[in-house]
Amino acid sequence: MKVEIKSKKGLRTILSVMVDKKNIQTKMNERLKELQKEVSLKGFRPGKVPPEVIKNQFGKSIYGEVVDKILRETTTKAIDEKKLKVAGQPKIDLKQFGEGKDLNYELQIDCLPSVTLKSFEKFKATSFKVKIEEKIIEEKLKEIANQNKQFENKNESEKALIGDQVSFDYSATIDGKKFDGSEGKNIQLELGKNLFLKGFDEQLIGVKKNDMKILNATLPANHPKKELANKKTKFECKILNVKKPKMNKIDDNFAKLLGAKNIKDLRSLIEKQISSQYSQALNSITKKEILDQIEKNHEIDLPQNLIDQEISIMTQNLKSEDKEKHKSNNEKLAKSRIKLGLLLNEYGEKNNLKISDDEVRNEIQKQIKGMPGQEKMVLEYYKKNPSASQSLKSSLYEEKIIELIKSKIKLTSKEINTKEAEKIITEFNKPNVDIGESKNSTPSKNKIKSKKISKK
Protein backbone atom coordinates (compact mmCIF):
# COMPACT_ATOMS: atom_id res chain seq x y z
CA MET A 1 0.00 0.00 0.00
CA LYS A 2 1.23 3.46 -0.94
CA VAL A 3 -0.13 6.59 0.78
CA GLU A 4 0.51 10.20 -0.25
CA ILE A 5 -0.94 13.52 0.91
CA LYS A 6 -2.53 14.92 -2.24
CA SER A 7 -3.70 18.19 -0.70
CA LYS A 8 -4.07 19.86 2.67
CA LYS A 9 -6.24 22.93 3.16
CA GLY A 10 -7.27 24.08 6.62
CA LEU A 11 -8.66 21.08 8.50
CA ARG A 12 -9.32 19.07 5.32
CA THR A 13 -6.74 16.59 4.08
CA ILE A 14 -7.00 14.46 0.93
CA LEU A 15 -4.92 11.28 0.84
CA SER A 16 -4.16 9.31 -2.31
CA VAL A 17 -4.03 5.57 -1.59
CA MET A 18 -2.85 2.82 -3.94
CA VAL A 19 -3.20 -0.91 -3.23
CA ASP A 20 -1.15 -3.20 -5.51
CA LYS A 21 -3.15 -5.62 -7.65
CA LYS A 22 -0.99 -8.49 -6.35
CA ASN A 23 -2.21 -7.86 -2.81
CA ILE A 24 -5.79 -7.78 -4.04
CA GLN A 25 -5.31 -11.08 -5.88
CA THR A 26 -3.84 -12.65 -2.73
CA LYS A 27 -6.92 -11.57 -0.77
CA MET A 28 -9.14 -12.97 -3.55
CA ASN A 29 -7.39 -16.34 -3.42
CA GLU A 30 -7.69 -16.47 0.37
CA ARG A 31 -11.42 -15.73 0.17
CA LEU A 32 -11.95 -18.38 -2.52
CA LYS A 33 -10.31 -20.99 -0.30
CA GLU A 34 -12.56 -20.01 2.58
CA LEU A 35 -15.61 -20.31 0.35
CA GLN A 36 -14.61 -23.84 -0.72
CA LYS A 37 -15.69 -25.01 2.75
CA GLU A 38 -19.02 -23.21 2.52
CA VAL A 39 -20.22 -23.46 -1.11
CA SER A 40 -22.35 -26.36 -2.31
CA LEU A 41 -22.80 -26.81 -6.06
CA LYS A 42 -24.49 -29.57 -7.99
CA GLY A 43 -22.01 -32.12 -9.30
CA PHE A 44 -19.39 -31.47 -6.61
CA ARG A 45 -18.90 -33.00 -3.21
CA PRO A 46 -19.19 -30.61 -0.23
CA GLY A 47 -15.91 -28.74 0.24
CA LYS A 48 -14.53 -29.91 -3.12
CA VAL A 49 -15.77 -27.18 -5.46
CA PRO A 50 -12.69 -25.87 -7.36
CA PRO A 51 -11.85 -22.18 -6.71
CA GLU A 52 -12.05 -21.47 -10.46
CA VAL A 53 -15.65 -22.69 -10.55
CA ILE A 54 -16.59 -20.58 -7.51
CA LYS A 55 -14.92 -17.56 -9.14
CA ASN A 56 -16.77 -18.06 -12.44
CA GLN A 57 -20.07 -18.35 -10.59
CA PHE A 58 -19.66 -15.63 -7.93
CA GLY A 59 -16.63 -13.63 -9.06
CA LYS A 60 -18.15 -10.13 -9.11
CA SER A 61 -19.71 -10.36 -5.68
CA ILE A 62 -16.55 -11.92 -4.20
CA TYR A 63 -14.42 -9.15 -5.70
CA GLY A 64 -16.77 -6.53 -4.26
CA GLU A 65 -16.62 -8.17 -0.84
CA VAL A 66 -12.81 -8.33 -0.90
CA VAL A 67 -12.41 -4.72 -2.07
CA ASP A 68 -14.83 -3.53 0.61
CA LYS A 69 -12.73 -5.25 3.27
CA ILE A 70 -9.50 -3.86 1.79
CA LEU A 71 -10.95 -0.33 1.81
CA ARG A 72 -11.86 -0.62 5.50
CA GLU A 73 -8.43 -1.94 6.43
CA THR A 74 -6.36 0.43 4.28
CA THR A 75 -8.25 3.61 5.22
CA THR A 76 -7.47 2.91 8.89
CA LYS A 77 -3.82 2.18 8.10
CA ALA A 78 -3.51 5.29 5.90
CA ILE A 79 -4.90 7.52 8.63
CA ASP A 80 -2.63 5.95 11.26
CA GLU A 81 0.40 6.22 8.97
CA LYS A 82 -0.12 9.96 8.50
CA LYS A 83 -1.02 10.39 12.21
CA LEU A 84 -4.28 12.18 11.48
CA LYS A 85 -7.00 12.81 14.10
CA VAL A 86 -10.21 12.27 12.20
CA ALA A 87 -13.40 14.25 12.82
CA GLY A 88 -16.37 12.26 11.54
CA GLN A 89 -16.51 9.68 8.76
CA PRO A 90 -13.92 10.02 5.93
CA LYS A 91 -15.21 10.05 2.33
CA ILE A 92 -13.84 7.61 -0.25
CA ASP A 93 -13.60 8.45 -3.94
CA LEU A 94 -12.65 5.42 -6.07
CA LYS A 95 -10.38 6.36 -8.96
CA GLN A 96 -9.40 2.93 -10.32
CA PHE A 97 -10.59 -0.57 -9.52
CA GLY A 98 -11.43 -3.87 -11.18
CA GLU A 99 -9.97 -7.36 -11.38
CA GLY A 100 -6.40 -7.39 -12.54
CA LYS A 101 -5.94 -3.69 -11.74
CA ASP A 102 -4.38 -1.73 -8.90
CA LEU A 103 -6.89 -0.16 -6.53
CA ASN A 104 -6.56 3.62 -6.45
CA TYR A 105 -8.73 5.86 -4.33
CA GLU A 106 -8.76 9.22 -2.59
CA LEU A 107 -9.61 9.64 1.05
CA GLN A 108 -11.13 12.98 2.05
CA ILE A 109 -10.61 13.57 5.77
CA ASP A 110 -11.82 16.35 8.03
CA CYS A 111 -9.31 16.49 10.88
CA LEU A 112 -9.72 17.61 14.44
CA PRO A 113 -7.97 20.92 15.08
CA SER A 114 -4.90 21.13 17.24
CA VAL A 115 -5.87 22.56 20.61
CA THR A 116 -3.59 24.79 22.70
CA LEU A 117 -4.95 25.38 26.18
CA LYS A 118 -4.44 28.64 28.00
CA SER A 119 -4.07 28.85 31.76
CA PHE A 120 -7.34 28.71 33.70
CA GLU A 121 -5.87 30.20 36.88
CA LYS A 122 -7.27 33.70 36.25
CA PHE A 123 -10.82 32.43 35.75
CA LYS A 124 -13.41 33.28 38.41
CA ALA A 125 -16.70 31.64 39.35
CA THR A 126 -19.21 31.52 42.19
CA SER A 127 -20.18 28.33 44.01
CA PHE A 128 -23.55 28.47 45.78
CA LYS A 129 -24.58 26.79 49.00
CA VAL A 130 -28.28 26.90 49.86
CA LYS A 131 -29.48 27.14 53.45
CA ILE A 132 -32.83 25.34 53.72
CA GLU A 133 -35.07 27.24 56.14
CA GLU A 134 -36.87 25.42 58.94
CA LYS A 135 -40.19 26.72 57.59
CA ILE A 136 -39.69 24.85 54.30
CA ILE A 137 -38.81 21.61 56.09
CA GLU A 138 -41.95 22.00 58.24
CA GLU A 139 -44.10 22.57 55.14
CA LYS A 140 -42.65 19.47 53.50
CA LEU A 141 -43.23 17.39 56.64
CA LYS A 142 -46.90 18.45 56.69
CA GLU A 143 -47.23 17.69 52.98
CA ILE A 144 -45.73 14.23 53.45
CA ALA A 145 -48.02 13.59 56.43
CA ASN A 146 -51.05 14.60 54.35
CA GLN A 147 -50.01 12.35 51.46
CA ASN A 148 -49.55 9.42 53.86
CA LYS A 149 -52.68 9.98 55.93
CA GLN A 150 -54.34 7.20 57.92
CA PHE A 151 -58.08 6.54 58.21
CA GLU A 152 -60.25 5.52 61.18
CA ASN A 153 -63.76 4.05 61.21
CA LYS A 154 -66.74 6.36 61.34
CA ASN A 155 -69.81 5.50 63.36
CA GLU A 156 -72.32 3.44 61.36
CA SER A 157 -74.76 6.34 61.44
CA GLU A 158 -72.25 8.84 60.05
CA LYS A 159 -72.45 9.70 56.36
CA ALA A 160 -69.53 9.80 53.95
CA LEU A 161 -68.07 13.23 53.14
CA ILE A 162 -65.44 14.48 50.70
CA GLY A 163 -62.07 13.30 52.02
CA ASP A 164 -63.50 10.15 53.60
CA GLN A 165 -62.53 6.66 52.48
CA VAL A 166 -65.40 4.43 51.30
CA SER A 167 -64.99 0.66 50.88
CA PHE A 168 -67.53 -1.25 48.78
CA ASP A 169 -68.30 -4.29 46.64
CA TYR A 170 -70.03 -3.73 43.31
CA SER A 171 -71.90 -5.64 40.62
CA ALA A 172 -72.23 -3.77 37.31
CA THR A 173 -74.40 -4.24 34.24
CA ILE A 174 -74.72 -2.70 30.78
CA ASP A 175 -78.29 -2.83 29.45
CA GLY A 176 -79.03 -5.31 32.24
CA LYS A 177 -76.23 -7.68 31.20
CA LYS A 178 -73.02 -8.65 32.98
CA PHE A 179 -69.66 -8.14 31.26
CA ASP A 180 -66.02 -9.04 31.76
CA GLY A 181 -64.85 -7.10 34.85
CA SER A 182 -68.35 -6.32 36.08
CA GLU A 183 -67.63 -7.54 39.64
CA GLY A 184 -65.45 -5.75 42.20
CA LYS A 185 -64.61 -6.61 45.81
CA ASN A 186 -63.50 -4.30 48.64
CA ILE A 187 -62.84 -1.29 46.39
CA GLN A 188 -61.47 1.62 48.41
CA LEU A 189 -61.93 5.21 47.25
CA GLU A 190 -60.89 8.44 48.89
CA LEU A 191 -63.78 10.69 47.94
CA GLY A 192 -62.78 13.78 46.02
CA LYS A 193 -59.78 12.32 44.21
CA ASN A 194 -61.92 10.94 41.35
CA LEU A 195 -59.65 7.95 40.74
CA PHE A 196 -62.38 5.47 39.68
CA LEU A 197 -64.88 6.79 37.12
CA LYS A 198 -65.97 10.32 36.34
CA GLY A 199 -68.83 11.36 38.63
CA PHE A 200 -68.52 8.21 40.77
CA ASP A 201 -67.17 9.88 43.93
CA GLU A 202 -69.96 12.47 44.09
CA GLN A 203 -72.61 9.74 44.10
CA LEU A 204 -71.01 8.12 47.15
CA ILE A 205 -71.28 11.27 49.25
CA GLY A 206 -73.84 10.64 51.99
CA VAL A 207 -73.64 6.82 52.07
CA LYS A 208 -73.30 4.93 55.38
CA LYS A 209 -71.89 1.54 56.33
CA ASN A 210 -74.12 -1.38 55.10
CA ASP A 211 -76.04 0.85 52.66
CA MET A 212 -77.01 -0.44 49.22
CA LYS A 213 -76.48 2.21 46.56
CA ILE A 214 -77.13 2.19 42.81
CA LEU A 215 -74.78 4.44 40.86
CA ASN A 216 -74.72 5.32 37.18
CA ALA A 217 -71.48 5.99 35.33
CA THR A 218 -69.98 5.85 31.85
CA LEU A 219 -67.01 3.59 31.13
CA PRO A 220 -63.96 5.48 29.80
CA ALA A 221 -63.33 6.03 26.07
CA ASN A 222 -59.93 4.34 26.41
CA HIS A 223 -61.32 1.18 28.02
CA PRO A 224 -59.04 -1.79 27.14
CA LYS A 225 -62.05 -3.62 25.70
CA LYS A 226 -63.21 -1.46 22.80
CA GLU A 227 -66.76 -2.86 22.88
CA LEU A 228 -67.15 -1.45 26.42
CA ALA A 229 -65.81 2.05 25.69
CA ASN A 230 -68.23 4.90 26.49
CA LYS A 231 -70.93 2.46 27.65
CA LYS A 232 -73.45 3.66 30.25
CA THR A 233 -73.19 1.32 33.22
CA LYS A 234 -75.25 0.68 36.36
CA PHE A 235 -73.32 -0.18 39.53
CA GLU A 236 -75.05 -1.87 42.47
CA CYS A 237 -72.81 -1.12 45.43
CA LYS A 238 -72.73 -2.68 48.90
CA ILE A 239 -71.05 -0.20 51.26
CA LEU A 240 -68.68 -2.15 53.49
CA ASN A 241 -67.24 0.69 55.55
CA VAL A 242 -66.79 4.45 55.79
CA LYS A 243 -63.63 5.90 57.32
CA LYS A 244 -62.59 9.47 58.07
CA PRO A 245 -59.05 10.79 57.73
CA LYS A 246 -56.91 10.81 60.84
CA MET A 247 -54.16 13.36 61.08
CA ASN A 248 -50.74 11.77 61.34
CA LYS A 249 -48.78 12.64 64.40
CA ILE A 250 -45.40 13.73 63.10
CA ASP A 251 -43.18 11.82 65.50
CA ASP A 252 -40.57 9.04 65.55
CA ASN A 253 -43.15 6.36 64.66
CA PHE A 254 -44.28 8.31 61.62
CA ALA A 255 -40.65 8.78 60.55
CA LYS A 256 -40.02 5.02 60.83
CA LEU A 257 -42.99 4.32 58.56
CA LEU A 258 -41.16 6.32 55.88
CA GLY A 259 -37.87 4.47 56.34
CA ALA A 260 -36.10 6.99 58.60
CA LYS A 261 -34.60 6.20 62.03
CA ASN A 262 -36.54 8.92 63.85
CA ILE A 263 -38.08 12.34 63.26
CA LYS A 264 -34.68 14.05 63.47
CA ASP A 265 -33.35 11.70 60.80
CA LEU A 266 -36.43 12.30 58.62
CA ARG A 267 -35.99 16.07 58.84
CA SER A 268 -32.33 15.67 57.91
CA LEU A 269 -33.18 13.51 54.88
CA ILE A 270 -35.78 16.02 53.70
CA GLU A 271 -33.28 18.86 54.06
CA LYS A 272 -30.65 16.90 52.10
CA GLN A 273 -33.05 16.08 49.27
CA ILE A 274 -34.24 19.68 48.88
CA SER A 275 -30.66 20.93 49.13
CA SER A 276 -29.52 18.37 46.55
CA GLN A 277 -32.12 19.54 44.04
CA TYR A 278 -31.07 23.17 44.42
CA SER A 279 -27.39 22.23 44.25
CA GLN A 280 -27.88 20.35 40.99
CA ALA A 281 -29.31 23.43 39.26
CA LEU A 282 -26.92 25.91 40.90
CA ASN A 283 -23.93 23.75 39.97
CA SER A 284 -25.09 24.01 36.36
CA ILE A 285 -24.94 27.80 36.67
CA THR A 286 -21.42 27.67 38.12
CA LYS A 287 -20.41 25.26 35.36
CA LYS A 288 -21.76 27.58 32.64
CA GLU A 289 -19.90 30.51 34.19
CA ILE A 290 -16.67 28.52 33.86
CA LEU A 291 -17.41 27.23 30.36
CA ASP A 292 -18.24 30.73 29.07
CA GLN A 293 -14.77 31.92 30.14
CA ILE A 294 -13.05 28.88 28.60
CA GLU A 295 -14.87 29.41 25.30
CA LYS A 296 -14.22 33.17 25.23
CA ASN A 297 -10.47 32.76 25.82
CA HIS A 298 -9.79 30.19 23.09
CA GLU A 299 -9.94 30.32 19.30
CA ILE A 300 -10.30 27.05 17.35
CA ASP A 301 -11.07 26.21 13.71
CA LEU A 302 -13.90 23.68 13.61
CA PRO A 303 -14.59 20.97 10.99
CA GLN A 304 -17.82 21.77 9.11
CA ASN A 305 -18.96 18.14 9.14
CA LEU A 306 -18.98 18.13 12.97
CA ILE A 307 -20.98 21.37 12.98
CA ASP A 308 -23.54 19.92 10.56
CA GLN A 309 -23.78 16.73 12.60
CA GLU A 310 -24.34 18.64 15.85
CA ILE A 311 -27.03 20.85 14.29
CA SER A 312 -28.77 17.72 12.98
CA ILE A 313 -28.85 16.20 16.47
CA MET A 314 -30.03 19.43 18.09
CA THR A 315 -32.87 20.04 15.66
CA GLN A 316 -33.99 16.50 14.84
CA ASN A 317 -37.39 16.98 16.51
CA LEU A 318 -38.08 20.44 15.07
CA LYS A 319 -40.24 21.31 12.07
CA SER A 320 -38.52 22.49 8.89
CA GLU A 321 -39.76 26.07 9.31
CA ASP A 322 -38.39 26.20 12.89
CA LYS A 323 -35.02 24.87 11.73
CA GLU A 324 -34.82 27.56 9.09
CA LYS A 325 -36.04 30.30 11.42
CA HIS A 326 -33.27 29.67 13.98
CA LYS A 327 -30.62 28.42 11.53
CA SER A 328 -28.02 31.07 12.40
CA ASN A 329 -28.48 30.79 16.16
CA ASN A 330 -28.42 26.99 16.08
CA GLU A 331 -25.17 27.00 14.12
CA LYS A 332 -23.68 29.32 16.72
CA LEU A 333 -24.81 27.00 19.53
CA ALA A 334 -23.48 23.91 17.71
CA LYS A 335 -20.08 25.55 17.27
CA SER A 336 -20.02 26.45 20.96
CA ARG A 337 -20.77 22.86 22.01
CA ILE A 338 -18.13 21.36 19.72
CA LYS A 339 -15.52 23.91 20.72
CA LEU A 340 -16.09 23.30 24.44
CA GLY A 341 -16.08 19.55 23.91
CA LEU A 342 -12.67 19.72 22.22
CA LEU A 343 -11.24 22.01 24.91
CA LEU A 344 -12.53 19.92 27.82
CA ASN A 345 -11.34 16.70 26.20
CA GLU A 346 -7.87 18.19 25.69
CA TYR A 347 -7.77 19.23 29.34
CA GLY A 348 -8.90 15.76 30.41
CA GLU A 349 -6.23 14.06 28.28
CA LYS A 350 -3.55 16.50 29.42
CA ASN A 351 -4.32 15.64 33.05
CA ASN A 352 -4.71 11.92 32.34
CA LEU A 353 -8.31 11.85 33.58
CA LYS A 354 -10.28 8.64 33.04
CA ILE A 355 -13.56 7.09 34.10
CA SER A 356 -13.35 3.47 35.24
CA ASP A 357 -16.06 0.85 34.83
CA ASP A 358 -16.39 0.84 38.64
CA GLU A 359 -17.23 4.55 38.61
CA VAL A 360 -19.96 3.93 36.02
CA ARG A 361 -21.35 1.04 38.09
CA ASN A 362 -21.32 3.18 41.24
CA GLU A 363 -23.25 5.92 39.47
CA ILE A 364 -25.85 3.42 38.29
CA GLN A 365 -26.18 2.20 41.89
CA LYS A 366 -26.77 5.80 43.01
CA GLN A 367 -29.57 6.07 40.47
CA ILE A 368 -31.05 2.80 41.72
CA LYS A 369 -31.04 4.05 45.33
CA GLY A 370 -32.86 7.15 44.21
CA MET A 371 -35.61 5.06 42.57
CA PRO A 372 -36.81 2.59 45.22
CA GLY A 373 -38.89 -0.23 43.77
CA GLN A 374 -37.54 0.30 40.24
CA GLU A 375 -34.10 -1.29 40.68
CA LYS A 376 -34.69 -4.03 38.12
CA MET A 377 -35.99 -1.58 35.51
CA VAL A 378 -32.91 0.65 35.84
CA LEU A 379 -30.49 -2.29 35.54
CA GLU A 380 -32.36 -3.68 32.52
CA TYR A 381 -32.26 -0.28 30.85
CA TYR A 382 -28.46 -0.07 31.04
CA LYS A 383 -28.02 -3.71 30.03
CA LYS A 384 -30.17 -3.31 26.93
CA ASN A 385 -28.79 0.13 26.00
CA PRO A 386 -24.97 0.16 25.81
CA SER A 387 -25.18 3.69 24.41
CA ALA A 388 -26.81 4.80 27.70
CA SER A 389 -23.82 3.49 29.67
CA GLN A 390 -21.46 5.27 27.27
CA SER A 391 -23.45 8.49 27.62
CA LEU A 392 -23.29 8.16 31.41
CA LYS A 393 -19.53 7.59 31.20
CA SER A 394 -19.14 10.74 29.07
CA SER A 395 -21.14 12.78 31.59
CA LEU A 396 -19.00 11.51 34.48
CA TYR A 397 -15.85 12.31 32.49
CA GLU A 398 -17.04 15.86 31.85
CA GLU A 399 -17.95 16.36 35.51
CA LYS A 400 -14.52 15.10 36.59
CA ILE A 401 -12.88 17.62 34.25
CA ILE A 402 -15.07 20.46 35.58
CA GLU A 403 -14.23 19.54 39.19
CA LEU A 404 -10.52 19.65 38.39
CA ILE A 405 -10.92 23.05 36.73
CA LYS A 406 -12.80 24.32 39.80
CA SER A 407 -9.82 23.37 41.95
CA LYS A 408 -7.53 25.50 39.77
CA ILE A 409 -9.57 28.69 39.43
CA LYS A 410 -10.64 31.36 41.93
CA LEU A 411 -13.90 29.87 43.21
CA THR A 412 -15.90 32.06 45.60
CA SER A 413 -18.36 30.25 47.86
CA LYS A 414 -21.62 32.08 48.57
CA GLU A 415 -24.34 31.00 50.99
CA ILE A 416 -27.87 31.92 49.92
CA ASN A 417 -31.43 31.17 51.07
CA THR A 418 -34.05 29.38 49.01
CA LYS A 419 -35.71 32.59 47.85
CA GLU A 420 -32.41 33.85 46.46
CA ALA A 421 -31.76 30.45 44.90
CA GLU A 422 -35.16 30.45 43.18
CA LYS A 423 -34.46 33.92 41.75
CA ILE A 424 -31.04 32.90 40.40
CA ILE A 425 -32.36 29.66 38.90
CA THR A 426 -35.41 31.34 37.35
CA GLU A 427 -33.18 33.90 35.65
CA PHE A 428 -30.88 31.16 34.39
CA ASN A 429 -33.82 29.11 33.13
CA LYS A 430 -35.21 31.75 30.80
CA PRO A 431 -36.10 29.95 27.55
CA ASN A 432 -33.33 29.35 25.06
CA VAL A 433 -34.96 30.73 21.91
CA ASP A 434 -32.37 29.08 19.66
CA ILE A 435 -33.96 25.67 19.88
CA GLY A 436 -37.02 26.38 22.00
CA GLU A 437 -35.73 24.70 25.16
CA SER A 438 -34.71 25.88 28.62
CA LYS A 439 -31.11 25.66 29.80
CA ASN A 440 -31.90 23.56 32.79
CA SER A 441 -34.77 22.45 34.98
CA THR A 442 -35.58 24.35 38.15
CA PRO A 443 -35.56 22.31 41.34
CA SER A 444 -38.77 22.50 43.26
CA LYS A 445 -39.63 21.74 46.84
CA ASN A 446 -42.73 20.01 45.51
CA LYS A 447 -40.69 17.42 43.63
CA ILE A 448 -39.45 15.74 46.80
CA LYS A 449 -40.65 12.14 46.97
CA SER A 450 -43.09 11.90 49.83
CA LYS A 451 -43.99 8.25 50.10
CA LYS A 452 -40.50 7.02 50.83
CA ILE A 453 -37.48 8.99 51.89
CA SER A 454 -34.43 7.35 50.37
CA LYS A 455 -30.94 7.62 51.78
CA LYS A 456 -28.31 8.34 49.19
Image (cartoon, rainbow, N blue to C red):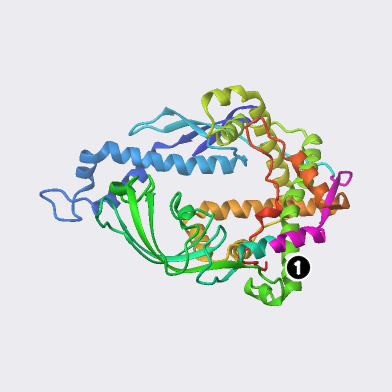
Looking at the image, how many numbered discs can be counted on the residues?
A: 1
Instruction: Please state the horizontal and vertical placement of residue 76, each as a whole percent of the image.
Output: 52, 43
Residue 10 appearing in the image = no
Q: Which residues are magenta?
A: 120-142
Q: Is disc 1 placed on a helix, strand or loop?
A: helix
Residue under numbered circle 1: 268
Residue 27's place in the image compared with 155, above or below, is above
- Is residue 92 toward the left or the right of residue 27 in the image? right
Residue 77's place in the image compared with 401, above or below, is above
Instruction: Please state the horizontal and vertical placement of residue 77, each as a whole percent of the image.
Output: 53, 43
Please name the residue shown 67% across and 77% down the image.
253
For the residue carrying disc 1, how many other residues have a C-alpha within 10 Å: few (<14), some (14-19), or many (20+)? few
Picture quarter containing residue 454? Answer: bottom right
Residue 70 appearing in the image = yes
Instruction: Please state the horizontal and vertical placement of residue 423, each as a whole percent of the image.
Output: 80, 43
Instruction: Please state the horizontal and vertical placement of residue 207, each as a whole percent of the image.
Output: 47, 62
Please name the residue shown 15% across and 48% down the image.
41
- Which residue occupies the foreground of this view, 9 or 140? 140
Three-letter residue code for mark 1: Ser
